[in-house]
Amino acid sequence: MAGWERQYDGDVQDYHIFTIRRYTAVSPRTGEAGHYVTLEAPDWANVIAITVDGEMLLVRQYRHGVDGYTLEIPAGTVEPGEDPLAAMVRELAEETGYVSEGWTRIGSSHPNPAYQGNVCHHFLALDCRKAGEQHLDAGEDIEIEVLPMPEVSRLIREGTIDQALAIAAFFRYAEVGQPGGKLL
């Protein structure tokens, strides 16, 4: 398929966590120009973190978008120039105080390709152990929950765990096989 020719008009708004860019693009199919908006955001990473006891680490945190607390897996932003695995190792330690020596990349997904170009990198961390305290940013409010895998499966099925990028990571996890039995 032919690409869409973009004509940027310089309308950019930077909001720190993402940039809004407006542009005109010409359809290769019709030749007609249309006006579009994209959100430019850094890549993200998240992790299915399993403890040495075979339980899963989850985080309950306040999310402004839903004005409430969500139950998710540890996740965070990949800083400019940072390797996604290094970002996730850092985020797991900061959000939970846990570390792992057993990391595997299990896939990635585009959060919303309709208007975003960034990627969420999904990881599996085995044999996680508590190595320190949380080191949260000033804007973070996170509680750690350690749950048996069957409980996590139930919470996904019931919709208690409903964050889309966490669900994508759980799907990738189910694809690669997991220690201790099937999650989904």
Image: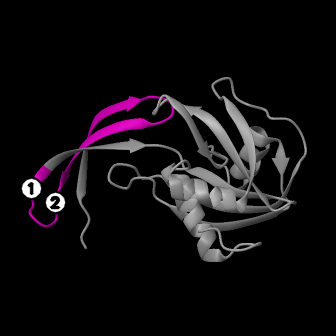
Instruction: Identify the image quadrant of the N terminus.
Output: bottom left
The mark that comes first in sequence, 1 or 2, is 2
Q: Is residue 33 among what the camera can see?
A: yes
Q: Position of residue 117 (x, y in %)?
A: 42, 53
Residue 80 in sight in this render: no
Disc 1, SS: loop
Q: Nearer the viewer, residue 57 or 37?
A: 57
Label 2 SS: loop
Judge left or right: residue 146 versus residue 131: left
- Identify the residue at horizontal 71%, vertical 35% (top origin): 143
| Amino acid type at mark 1 | Glu
Q: Report if the CB atoms under discs 1 and 2 are less than 8 Å apart.
A: yes
Does residue 12 appear left or right of residue 14 in this picture? left
* Residue 4 to residue 12: above or below: below
- Is most of the magenta stretch helix, strand or loop? strand
The Cα–Cα distance between marks 1 and 2, rounded to whole angstroms, is: 6 Å
What residue did someone put label 1 on? 32
Determine if the magenta segment contains residue 103: no
Type of amino acid at the residue the image marks with label 2:
Ser
The residue segment tinted magenta is 8-33
Mark 2 = which residue? 27
Residue 180 vs residue 46, the one in the foreground: 180
Q: Residue at x 29, y 35 (%)?
A: 10
At x 34% / y 33%, what residue is drawn?
Answer: 12
